[in-house]
Image: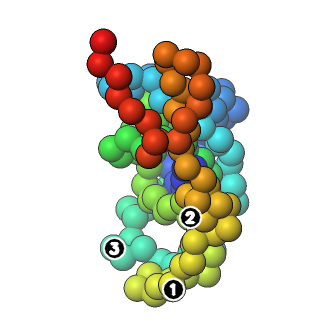
Amino acid sequence: MAKTYWAQVEGIPDEAALERLRRGVKLKDGMTKPADARLIEPPAVWPRNPPIRYRAHIPESWIELTLREGRNRQVRRMTAAVGHPTLRLIRVSVGPWKLEDLQPGQWRVLGSPPELLQAASKPKRLRDKKHGLETPRHRRRRHRE
């Protein structure tokens, strides 16, 4: 399931840094999957408490990253690997659910989107290796040979 983040980073990433994020970045635990990455205008978000340290000589910018995997501290490690450490990180969507105008401390009840309900109602099918047929998981027998 895709997860979208807004990351405030040190410096202004050039196209080469964004392209590295798009292709995947080599981290200590292996290559990341390609991500969607783009520069965005500073979003209208709530103030951070405590505020991020201000440095007059180092500019800051915001990027939007969409990942399709979830490693520990992945966004922070990816932006650092391309030379732009993350200062602030906000997850704005997970799959079809979006943060939108929700403020810190607020919540709302979410229903299941129709596409997830439809996918959950279909039985998973597995290939029967012996006969080359697809069979529903609940009707599959294990053959010992």
Residue topped by disc 3: 50
Label 2 SS: strand
**Label 1, on which residue?**
108
Q: Nearer the viewer, residue 62 or 141?
A: 141
Residue depicted at x 49% and y 63%: 90
**Badge 1 local density, few (<14 within 10 Å), some, or many (20+)?**
few
- Residue 65, horizontal then vertical, whole percent: 59, 47
Q: Position of residue 47 (x, y in %)?
A: 48, 77
x and y, in percent, of residue 73 in the image: 35, 46
Q: Earlier in the sequence, mark 2 or mark 3?
A: 3
Q: From the viewer's perspective, is 54 left or right of 144?
A: right
Q: Nearer the viewer, residue 145 or 5?
A: 145
Task: Name which of mark 2 and mark 1 comes first in the sequence.
Answer: 2
Q: Are marks 1 and 3 in contact (CB under 8 Å)?
A: no
Residue 26: quarter of image: top left
The residue lying toward the viewer, choosing from 17 and 138, is 138
Question: For mark 2, what is the residue?
Answer: 92
| Label at residue 17 | none
Q: Secondary structure at mark 3?
A: loop
Residue type at mark 1 is: Arg
Which of discs 1 and 3 lies nearer the camera? The answer is 1
Depth check, mark 2 against mark 3: the one in front is: 2
Instruction: Name the amino acid, label 2.
Output: Val
Separation of residues labelled 1 and 3 (CA atoms): 26 Å
Which label lies toward us, 2 or 1?
Answer: 1
Q: Position of residue 135 (x, y in %)?
A: 54, 35
Q: Is residue 21 above or below residue 12?
A: above
Query: 23 or 88, which lies in front?
Result: 23
Upstream in sequence: badge 1 or badge 3 = 3
